[in-house]
Image (spheres, coloured by chain):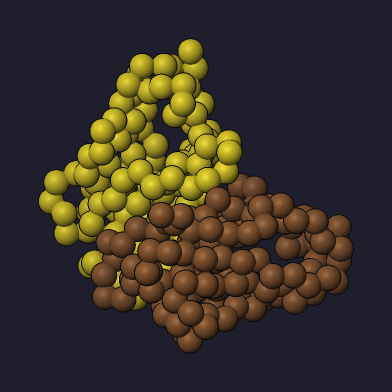
Chain colours: A yellow, B brown
Amino acid sequence: AQKITQTQPGMFVQEKEAVTLDCTYDTSDQSYGLFWYKQPSSGEMIFLIYQGSYDEQNATEGRYSLNFQKARKSANLVISASQLGDSAMYFCAMREPNNDMRFGAGTRLTVKP
Amino acid sequence: NAGVTQTPKFQVLKTGQSMTLQCAQDMNHEYMSWYRQDPGMGLRLIHYSVGAGITDQGEVPNGYNVSRSTTEDFPLRLLSAAPSQTSVYFCASSFSGQGYSGNTIYFGEGSWLTVV
């Protein structure tokens, strides 16, 4: 069964605007971690942000924030003030205890000047 | 601090050939894993290891072997390459996921493998 769903294959955003990338997940564990990674055209996987299932506040890292809605099982990534360098693939991932990390299919973000 | 290093970066194989993708990490991570990335499918787990001498299968293990004789190294062996194994392969490591889900995974730079 698909554990991580990213419903947006591609997104466009104007430079300097904010954009939200959607992610929903499926788990029966109470304890889990949610992650977002960025993959630029060069191919490397870059860790962006982490949210623990017991964290009461939404995670933030610079221009990245995670809109965590536990009851809806969603963990959307918000990028504020988009930059041209933000153009990349973005992957949502979930890790359960004693388990590996599972990834969504990704969203390709294109920032337009 | 090199992080996760994988080699080679690019490789072309003929169908039926075997090869080993090397992976090493210098962060003393217990957990190491191999993923493959195919277009439109995100990353899928091939094999993983929670420590030296311990390996287990992931989502897509067929056609691959692994071993973990040291904490630092986790090679991936393709036994008899097939065109369906054309993909980008990522090695990754983290502190153990045992009992805790907050350890992020750090990736190598990827290995582009083409089987003709």
Residue A3, percent from left and from top: 43, 61
Residue B109, percent from left and from top: 55, 50
The answer to whether one can see residue A11 in this image is: no
Query: Please, which residue is most extreme toward the bottom here?
Result: B53
Q: Is residue A4 above or below residue A91?
A: below
Residue A90, percent from left and from top: 46, 41
Foreground residue, A49 or B7?
Answer: B7
Left or right? Give the position of B7 relative to B25: right
Foreground residue, B36 or A109?
Answer: B36
Foreground residue, A75 or B85?
Answer: B85
Left or right? Give the position of A7 relative to B103: right
- Quarter of the picture holding the C terminus of chain B: bottom right
- Quarter of the picture holding the N terminus of chain B: bottom left
Residue drawn at the location 41% of the way across and 22% of the way down: A83
Q: Quarter-wise, where is residue A86 in the image?
A: top left
Residue drawn at the location 23% of the way across and 57% of the way down: A52
Query: Please, which residue is most extreme toward the front here?
Result: B1
The answer to whether one can see residue B22 in this image is: yes
Query: Please, which residue is most extreme toward the top here?
Result: A113
Residue drawn at the location 48% of the way across and 47% of the way down: A45
Q: Is residue B32 above or below residue A68?
A: below
Residue A24, percent from left and from top: 37, 50
Q: Is residue B35 above or below residue A106?
A: below
Residue drawn at the location 85% of the way across and 71% of the way down: B16
Counting the numbered discs, the total is 0
Left or right? Give the position of B26 relative to B47: left
